[in-house]
Amino acid sequence: MPDINKQFSLLEEHHENISIADAYNGFYENQADYIIEGDIHPTTEGQRILADVGIEVLKPYFEN
């Protein structure tokens, strides 16, 4: 995942109209709390965190 995340960061650096919603950092060290055990999908609380991350990234586009 760190290598993939780095590629996304490079996209953001080289293109003006791209914003990255960073789910990985949104979960911090709480992966066990926010990912369903034995799965890759978020728990209900994980979905709330992802929504918050998305809202923060999109907010500047709706403030004007």
Image (spheres, rainbow, N blue to C red):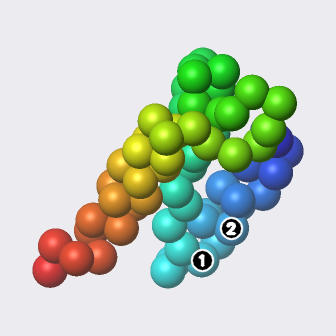
Distance of label 1 from label 2 (alpha carbons)? 6 Å
| x then y, percent, for residue 52 | 36, 49
Q: Are marks 1 and 2 in contact (CB under 8 Å)?
A: yes
> For the residue labelled by badge 2, is the local secondary structure a helix, a strand or a loop?
helix
Quadrant of residue 20 in the image?
Answer: bottom right
Q: Which mark is residue 11?
A: 2
| x then y, percent, for residue 58 | 36, 67
Residue 54 in sight from this viewpoint: yes
Label 1, residues with CA under 10 Å away: few <14, some 14-19, many ≥20: few
Residue 6 in sight from this viewpoint: no
Label 2, residues with CA under 10 Å away: few <14, some 14-19, many ≥20: some
Which amino acid type is marked by label 1?
A: His
| x then y, percent, for residue 33 | 57, 23
Horizontal side of 56 relative to 53 (left or right) equals left
> For the residue labelled by badge 1, is the local secondary structure a helix, a strand or a loop?
loop
Q: Which residue position is annotated with label 1?
A: 15
Q: Which mark is residue 34?
A: none
Q: Residue at x 69, y 46 (%)?
A: 41
Q: How many numbered dots are placed on residues in this image?
A: 2
Residue that sits furthest to the left in the current view: 64
Q: Residue at x 66, y 55 (%)?
A: 9
Q: Nearer the viewer, residue 13 or 57?
A: 57
